[in-house]
Amino acid sequence: MAETPLAFEIATFVVLALFFIVDLFIIGRRPHVPSTKECVQHIAFFVVMALIFGGCIWYFAGSKPAIEFYSGWLTEYSLSIDNLFVFVIIMSNFAVPKKIQKYVLSVGITIALIFRGLFILIGAALISRFTWVFFIFGAFLIYTAIKLVVGGDEDEEYHENGLIRTLRKVIKITDEYDGEKLRTTRNGVRYWTPMLIVFLTIGTTDVMFAFDSIPAIFGLTKDPFLVFTSNVFALLGLQQLYFLLGALLDKLVYLPAGLSIVLGFIGIKLVMEALHGNTLPFINGGEGVHWVPEIPTWLSLAVIVVAIGGAAIASIIKMKSMEKVEKA
C-alpha cells in the first residue's frame, strides 16, 4: 500500500519520465564516448536528485518511507554496478564499437526498466495475496549471497543462451555493424546487423538481473511506488557510470563480498518477516511466530551503507597497495 500522496506520485512519474527521455533518448542517442567530466556531472546530478527525492518523501510521507527509499536505492544502485561487469563482457564479446556503446546502453537500460516494472507488478500482486512468498524470496537471496561469496574469485564469462544460438542459425546476420541500424544491405541482400543480437542479449540478461534485484527491494519496502522509484533512480546515469568505471570494474574486488552481505541480510530479514506473519499450516499451526524480532528500517540502511561502503574502501586500499607493489 502506498504511503505517499497521489499527487506527489503523479508528479514524480512525470519528472522521472522527463529524466529518462533526456538521459536516454536525447543525450544517449548522440553517438560519442563521454568524457570523464561529462560522466561525473551526470552521475552527480542523478545522485543529488535521488537524495532530494528521498527528502521530499520524508516531508510528504514521513521518515520511515524515506529511509526505505534510501535503503532500496543504495541496494539497487550497488546491484546495478555489479551488473556493469556483465555489460562490459557483452560489449567486448560482440565487439560493439565504442562510439555506439552509449546508444546500446540506452536501449538496454530501457529494456531493464520495462522488465523491472513487470516484475514489480507481479511481486506486489504475489505479496498482497500470499505472504509465504517471502520464504521463497528470502531463500533465493540467501542462495545468491552464498553464490557470490563462493564464486567471487572466478572469472566471469558470458555464454550465449539457446535463443541467441538458434537465432544465428535461422536468420541472416552480418559480422559488421552499420552504425545504430538493425538492418543493412549487402550486395542487394537484406541482413540483420549484430545489433539485434546485442539487444536480445542485454534484454535476456536484464531478466536475470530482475530476479536478483526485485526480491531484494521487496525485502526493504512493500510499497510498489518506492520499489519502482528506487529502481528508476538506480538506472538513471548508469550509462555514464559504465564509461566512468569501465576500466576500474575489475579492481572493485570486494564488491561481490559487500553485495553478498547485503543480499544475505535482506534474505534473512524476509524469512523473519515471513515467520512473523506466517499463514502456512505446517509452521506453528498456521500462526505467526511472534517471538521473531522485526528488523527496523534504519538498521537495514546502516547495514547496506557499511557493507557497500566498506567493500568500496577495502577495494580502493587493495588497489593502492597493488599499485605500490607494481611500482616497487
Image (cartoon, rainbow, N blue to C red):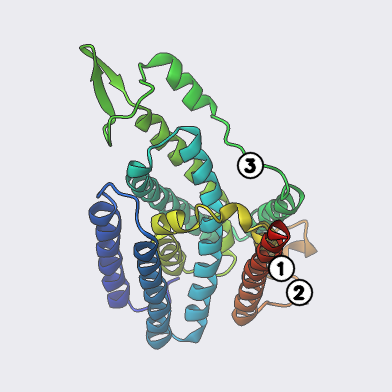
Tell me if I can see residue 155 in this picture.
Answer: yes
Circle 3 residues within 10 Å: few <14, some 14–19, many ≥20? few
Circle 2 residues within 10 Å: few <14, some 14–19, many ≥20? some
Question: Pointer 3 and pointer 1: residues touching (CB < 8 Å)?
Answer: no
Mark 3: which amino acid? Answer: Glu
Instruction: Return the residue at label 3.
Output: 156
Q: Quadrant of residue 190?
A: top left
Q: Residue furthest front?
A: 328
Query: Of the residues tagged 3 and 2, which is closer to the observer?
Result: 3
Task: Identify the residue at horizontal 36%, vertical 74% (top origin).
Answer: 49
Secondary structure type for disc 2: loop
Task: Identify the residue at horizontal 67%, vertical 77% (top origin).
Answer: 295
From what the image shows, is residue 318 above or below residue 133?
Answer: below
Point out the image quarter for the C terminus.
bottom right
Viewer-proximal residue, 224 or 181? Answer: 181
Secondary structure type for disc 3: loop
Closer to the chain start, of discs 3 and 1, is 3
Task: Identify the residue at horizontal 34%, vertical 45% (top origin).
Answer: 107
Instruction: Return the residue at label 1.
Output: 272
Instruction: Return the residue at label 2.
Output: 292
Tell me if I can see residue 204 in this picture.
Answer: no
From what the image shows, is residue 95 above or below residue 29?
Answer: above
Mark 1: which amino acid? Answer: Met
Query: Of the residues tagged 3 and 1, which is closer to the observer?
Result: 3
